[in-house]
Amino acid sequence: MNSLTSFILHPLITLNIGNDDDEPAGIDVIYLLSIFFALGIWLVFQRYQKMHNSPVPFDVAVPLPADPAWESVPIRDPHLESHLEQEEITPALSLPGRRYITSFDPATGLHIGTYIADNEDEIRGKIHMSANAQKKWKRTTFTQRRRVVRSLMKWLVDNQEVCARVACRDSGKTLIDAALGEILTTCSKMEWLLNHGEAALKPERRASNLMMSYKRSEVHYEPLGVVAAIVSWNYPLHNAWSPILAAIFSGNGIVVKCSESVIWSTTWFVGAMTACLRACGHDPELIQVVCCYPEQAQALTKSPLIKHITFIGSEEVGRKVAIDATEHLTPVTLELGGKDPAIILPGTDLNKWISLWMRGVFQNMGQNCIGIERLIVHADQYDDLHDLLSERTKKLRVGSVLAASPEGYVSTIDGGAMISGQRFRALERVLRDAAEGGANVEGGAQYNHVYLENGSFFTPTIVGPVDASMDIAQQELFAPIAVIMPYENIEEAITIANGTRYGLGASVFGPDQKQALNVAKRLECGMVSVNDFGVFYINQDLPFGGTKSSGYGRFGGPEGLRSLTNTKAIIVDRWPSFIQTSIPKVLDYPLRSLYQSWEFSSGLVRFLYADGWRPRIRGLVALVQAARK
Ligand SMILES: *[C@@H]1O[C@H](CO)[C@@H](O)[C@H](O)[C@H]1NC(C)=O
Ligand SMILES: *[C@@H]1O[C@H](CO)[C@@H](O)[C@H](O)[C@H]1NC(C)=O
C-alpha cells in the first residue's frame, strides 16, 4: 500500500478498530466526510467542464450527389475537344433579370444543380447579417469559441468520408487528395486553434524603458468586425473552413465568396458550420457564403463594413481586389499562387525521395498552390530522375471515385479530373513550345477518358530538360506536369529557383541538412520544407504566404490570426496611486522661459540617451538646474 492510499484509508481502518485507538472516533468521521465532500466538488467540476467543453453534436443531411450511385444529366464542357457547344441547363423556374451558376461534376460531367448568383443587394444584405451577429459573438469567451471548433472537429472526423465525397463530386478530385488536402489540413488547423489560438490572441505585456519605467505596456488583439475571404476552388472544404475558423476564433463575422466552380459543395460545407453554431447556441448568421459573377464582387470588396479581405486566387484578380480595397483602406492578405521549386542538391538519394516528389507534383492533379512546379536537379542526376518519374507517371490512372468503372477496367485511380477544360488549350500550347525549344514531353495533352467521355482530364505529364527562358519555366501551370530543370552548380540552382516572378513555397532536398538549410535561406519565398514537401502547412503554428508576385500578408499561425484583429497598444500606470505623469513647471504652458525649457528638455535627452555616464550626469545636472530656476 503506498502512502497516499494508506493516508486515505487511514480513517476507515481507524473507524473499524474504533475504540481501541487513543484518538477520539469523531475526528475520523469529519475527516471522512471532508474527503467525500472534496470528491463531490471535484465530480461537479468535472461535470461542469464536460458540459462546457465537450463537443456539441449536430446533424447535416447528406446531399444526394455525394452518393456514387447518384445519377443526373451530363453537361458538355465547351472547352473539351470532343464537344463544340455547351448545353444550356436553364432552371425550371427562371427569374427575369437574374443570372445563374451551373454546377457540375468535372469528372463525369453530371449536372449537380443550377443556382441563382447573388446580386449586389443580396451581398450587402449578407454582410449586414454577419455584422449584426458579430455584435454578440465578439463578446464570447475563448472557451465558447473552442467549443464550436471542437464540435466542428468531431463532426468532420466522424463524417470525413461524406465530406471527401462532396469535395470529389464538385471538384473531380480523388478521395486521397481530399483526405490529405482537405480533411487533414483542416483538422490540423482546428487542433492548432484549440491548443494555441488563445495564446496568440490574449493581451500580452510589452517591454518598457527608463523613461516609461513607471508604466505598464500591453497589446490587445480585438476583433475587427466582419471580414471577407475570397477563395479558390481547388480545396472547396479547406479553403472555406480555414478562413472561417480563423475569423470566428478571433471574434469576427465572415463572408466567404466561393468560386462559381464549387458553389454546391461550398454551400454545403459552410452550412455544416452554421448548423454547428446553431447547435452551440450562437447566431448562425455570423457566417455567410456569397457566390456571384465578378461584376458583382465589388459589393464585397468595396464594402465599408468589410474590415479585412483574404484573397486566394490569381495574380490578376488579386490586384483588382487590392485596388478595390483602397476605397475604404481595407487591409488585404493576398495569396496569388506560385511556381514552387524543389531543389535537389547533388548526391541526393533519388529513390528515397521520389515518392514525395510524385505527391508534390501530382497531388490534386497539380491544382495546388504549393505544388511542386519545378524539379531543379543536378545535370548528373537528370537522366536518373527523368527515368524514375517517367516510370511511375506512366502508371498513373485517372478517373472518378464517384463513377462505377465498367467491366474490364481497374477501379483504383490515382488522379482525378481537372476543375474544367478551360485551360487545356493553353497548357497544350506551352508544352508544345517547350518541345519546340528542345524539351522532351511525355504526355502533354487533354486525356479523352475511355468511359468518362464528358470528364475534363489531363494526362499526367513529364517535360525536360527545361531551361529558365522557356514559358513553361515561368508560368504557373496548376496542372499535373512535372517540369525538370537541370543545373551545373548550386549557385545556378538558386538562380533558377529565384528566377520567376513568384515566391510562395519551396523545398530543398539533399544529404547534408546544413547545406540544404543554407540554400533554403537564400530562396526568395515565404515557406520552405527541407527534405519534405508542403509540411510547413501541416504545422499550423507557421504563417502561410509568399513574397513577390505570390502576394503579401500571412494567414495561418499567430501572424494570420492577428491579421484579423485590431492590434491595440494600451499603456497604463504601474503604481497609479504612487506615481503618474506630471508636466514639470519649466515645461508647463504658458512657458516661463524658452531658454530654460530648452535647457531642461535637452538635458533630459542627454540624461536618457547620451553615450557614457559622464555626459549623462551633466545632462541630469543641467535639467535639475533648469527646473530649479
Ligand atoms: C456525355 O454527354 C452526352 C451529352 O450530354 C451524353 O449523351 C452522354 O451519354 C454522356 N456520356 C457519358 C458517359 O455520360
Ligand atoms: C536569389 O537568387 C538570385 C540569383 O542567384 C540572387 O540574385 C538573389 O540575391 C537571391 N535572393 C536572396 C534573398 O538571396
Image: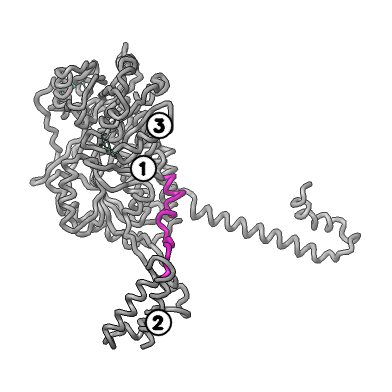
Residue annotated with mark 3: 515
Spatial CA distance of label 1 from label 3 is: 51 Å
Residue annotated with mark 2: 624
Residue annotated with mark 1: 60
Q: Is residue 122 magenta?
A: no
Magenta part of the chain: 189-212
Circle 2 packing at 10 Å, graded few (<14), some (14-19), many (20+), is: some
Whether residue 2 is visible: yes
For badge 3, the amino acid type reads Gln
Label 1 lies in ligand 1 vicinity (Cβ under 8 Å): no
Spatial CA distance of label 3 from label 2 is: 59 Å
Label 1: which secondary element: loop
Q: Is residue 208 magenta?
A: yes
Residue nearest the observer in this picture, 322 or 400: 322
* Image x and y of residue 492, in percent: 27, 28
* Image x and y of residue 518, in percent: 38, 35
For badge 1, the amino acid type reads Val
Residue nearest the observer in this picture, 35 or 484: 484
Q: Residue at x 25, y 36 (%)?
A: 338
Whether residue 122 is visible: no
